[in-house]
Image: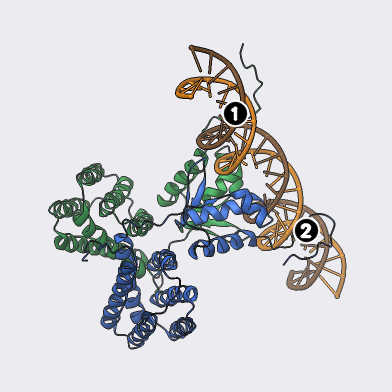
Chain colours: A green, B blue, C orange, D brown
Amino acid sequence: MKAPKTKPAAVPERKRGSGVKFVYDLLRDEILDLVLAPGSPIDEVQLAERFSMSRTPIREALVRLAGEGLIDTLPNRSTMVANLDFLNMSPFFDALTLMYRVTTQLAAQNRRPADLEAIHARQAEFAAAVKAQDALAMIATNAAFHAAIADAGRNPYFNSLFSRLLDEGRRFLRLYYQSYDDRLPQQFVDEHEAMIAAIVARDTALADRLSKAHAEQIVQQIQKLMIGDERLDVTL
Amino acid sequence: MKAPKTKPAAVPERKRGSGVKFVYDLLRDEILDLVLAPGSPIDEVQLAERFSMSRTPIREALVRLAGEGLIDTLPNRSTMVANLDFLNMSPFFDALTLMYRVTTQLAAQNRRPADLEAIHARQAEFAAAVKAQDALAMIATNAAFHAAIADAGRNPYFNSLFSRLLDEGRRFLRLYYQSYDDRLPQQFVDEHEAMIAAIVARDTALADRLSKAHAEQIVQQIQKLMIGDERLDVTL
DNA sequence: TGCATATTCTTTGTCGACAAGAATTACACA
DNA sequence: TGTGTAATTCTTGTCGACAAAGAATATGCA
């Protein structure tokens, strides 16, 4: 046969540093797509069994997710998916709008050919998702589109905050959109195109104006959806 | 420091969840005060011996520090204190200036009585540090002062980015200031007072103007300290 | 000597196990 | 039946140990 050395019982079957990243990426997606509901508990041993690994890499992934505010940890007690704060959304909208503007403006200023390729690619993916009426894909590709613009702006500080805001936004949108069947998605595609044109033309003023309008549009839409949902509830 | 070991076997001598926080806080301060030089390697086992604990809590603290960008980790290889990037500081200055402006403006808008108390307290600490000519204390209390203003603005998204920028700024300043003996510190005290007055008066426009000038002042000072090279103009 | 390869060493990533808190249940007692 | 307390369970925090991946060093051969 073979095997001059008898192997230990456990067969690794995966590369050394990959466990943490795998768990982190998967949990992050599940949280952002609301597969894991906000507030739902997270059990380390359960995850360890699910991924067939020890609790140690699971734990590290959770620590990183907690660092990004995607999960909340109570010392010596449970850990759970971070809740969405519906009562004070203003700070979120403020930050989101400002980051839309700043990153788009910086992109118009600092873009390079490779950036434009990436932006066009993301826009194509978003347009495809719109055409396919795939709400989940729309949300994800829209975030990726704006992240690509931010990358072209080349400011890592803004980018990290913007990424976090876009993540948070994915959760909000996922909550309200079961299906897109109105005219808005196509309008977003058009607005994206206009923003791309401003970036290509290096027109920072136009980029700012368009991104501001785009952001306000999105904020308005989310607010409209929320108000409609809260109508069932008792007045706050 | 060490308590007497009266009991025979292993004596924990410390509370359960405190290990990680202790190591995290201490390492963070040492990094920000440049006790640990940028680029210097970090050895897990050495830290474990130093704090008399296992590698596990050390590791968790390092993961969190890596999440904030204070240390860099090469997979399967060494981990070290994050370097300061002197070549492209523009993104840092851009972000710092914008956050100065936004947080101060929001503070003028949303401040409450308790906030003003905290701001005044921090300003007093800063003034005391200036009077005492304590450069290290000046740097730390200055950052705390602006963090207090940001708290009054009540936008956690801006606050987290701003905290990170102020941390980064602490490292830069610590690098260049061995001693303060020029007129600038007192000028900072005066500018802080003016900003406080604008916040008290709820004058957002004035707060924006003052914070912008303050930020540009600081940026100019850092630039002057660095090699006489001028950075590219960034107009937002 | 110079270079390629094998061996050792160092540091990180992962594991299974155990103990401490907190939550939950069981229980005694009025 | 209700309540305060003790035992149990359940989850997390910590530990020591081992294996894997690089780096450093030694070895063999032209």
Q: Nearer the viewer, residue A46 or B186?
A: B186
The amino acid marked with disc number 2 is Val
**Residue tagged by mark 2?**
B11
- Give the x, y percent position of residue A25: 44, 45
Q: Which mark is residue A11?
A: 1
Q: Which quarter of the figure has residue A124?
A: top left
Give the left or right position of residue A72, taking residue B211 as reference.
Answer: right
Under tag 2, what secondary structure?
A: loop
**Placement of the C terminus of chain B among the 4 image quadrants:** bottom left
Residue A51, horizontal then vertical, whole percent: 54, 39
Badge 2 density bin: few <14, some 14–19, many ≥20, Cα 10 Å: few
* Nearest to the observer: residue A118 or residue B231: B231
* Separation of residues labelled 1 and 2 (CA atoms): 37 Å
Which amino acid type is marked by label 1? Val
**Residue drawn at point x = 39 percent, y = 84 percent:** B186
On the rendered structure, is A176 left or right of B48?
left
Q: Position of residue B212 (x, y in %)?
A: 28, 75
